[in-house]
Image (spheres, helix red, strand yellow):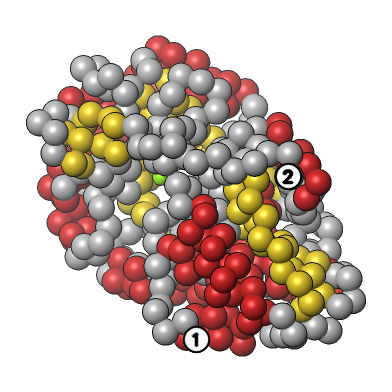
Amino acid sequence: MRITEARVIVTCPGRNFVTLKIVTDEGVTGVGDATLNGRELAVAAYLTEHVVPVLIGRDPARIEDTWQYLYQGAYWRRGPVTMSAIAAVDTALWDIKGKIAGLPVYQLLGGRSRAGVTVYAHAQAVSIESVLSEISSCVDLGYQAVRVQTGIPGLESTYGVSGQAFYEPASAALPAENVWSTAHYLDHVPRVFAAVRAEFGPTLRLLHDVHHRLTPIEAARLGRSLEPYHLTWMEDPVPAELQEGFRLIRQHTTTPIAVGEVFNSIWDCQELITGQLIDYIRTSVVHAGGITHLRRIFDLAALYHVRSGSHGATDLSPVCMAAALHVDLAIPNFGLQEYMRHTPETDEVFPHSYHFEDGYLHPGEEPGLGVDIDEELAGRYPYRPAALPVNRLQDGTVHSW
Ligand code: CS2
Ligand code: MG
């Protein structure tokens, strides 16, 4: 079997997605997500100009060899653009391999290790009162874990809160600007979780995304102030380039830490994992080199009591979600899977077999990944320039968004 064609499909059913579809001479096709929020066309160009030409004529069965060829062969290694492009190829080749074997990909990864994939929902609202009713709706839908984000009194807007049903941060062609105050934030968040625990009791699994905004000692203070509320995790407490910075947080608090959605290789998190500086690693199929590389990261994590907690925001397409579920179902150290529901038009462009039941997502039993892209429908949604916001402190200093 040989690869005869690889199409890069950019579509915008409510938000931009980049999908790679690989076609073989026996008519079997596979898809991979290549979406990098706010930088979609960079990955599309990387695929079109530098990857697709070398795929034509290759044997699609040689997944590992293709991965190494694209990684080592590029000379310029790693980075979000390169690794999202490699991820799309890798994911599509696993899809093809499953279809040829007549098996869902999780069977090729060692078979099912659990009944289903426990997912967490998002509860986001401006006020504490309104976020309590959001959480209640999530619980009524059967979710066993909920991420809680609210507005910050004194700040006009903040990450993760829109007040609409679908939260999409990349809304304008040029970056919107948000204003941030760590003092207001650190004062407010413990009150949110005190109210949530008072309303929902001690066992509902609660998460919170700090979104890279604190220093290690500020994160230590936040973690300690949240200890009475026993969060499942505090996410992205600090910008994670400085992996050793997490030692300082670890010294002061037992609140579990999750990090990794912006990582694109095992090297970004090797020290965090081997030093047991984190409890969950959030790397994703689309941004961390595909199924092949993500398994390497999770296998390393398993040696150090670190569990998976993959990113699953709406800017990761249903193709990525489908692939993630096959990995989540098979690995021994699964923790949680993020699940922000896509819009109806997105689900229509990406027909898939995964489904939600009793707090679990199930990938389905279709051969391959159980997802595809309706190219005719995708063509009706042209790309729309969209950038992620920029954050500033109240004195105007640029700050992590
Ligand atoms: C967030 C993401 O879901 C999360 O945990 O960190 O929504 C993130 O802000 C977006 O994926 C950025 O595009
Ligand atoms: Mg996050």
Q: Position of residue 127 (x, y in %)?
A: 36, 15
Dot 1 amino acid type: Gly
How far separated are the C-alphas under marks 2 and 1? Answer: 32 Å
Which SS class for mark 2? helix
Q: Is residue 142 left or right of residue 390?
A: right
Q: Which residue is mark 2?
A: 378
Q: In what quadrant does ligand 2 lie?
A: top left
Residue 50 in the image, given as x and y percentages of width and height? 55, 75
Query: Where in the figure is residue 267, as x and y percent of width and height?
Result: 36, 74
Q: Residues within 10 Å of mark 2 (few under 14, many from 20)?
A: many
Left or right: residue 151 versus residue 81 is left
Image quadrant holding the N terminus, namely bottom right
Q: Is mark 2 within 8 Å of ligand 1?
A: no
SS class of the residue under badge 1? loop
- As drawn, the label of residue 73 is 1
Residue at the spot 22% in from the left edge and 58% down from the top edge: 246
Which one is earlier in the sequence, the residue at label 2 or at label 1?
1
Q: Looking at this view, is 50 or 83 the one in front?
A: 50
Q: Considering only vertical position in the picture, is 308 above or below 145?
A: below
Q: Residue at x 50, y 15 (%)?
A: 133
Q: Amino acid at mark 2?
A: Ala
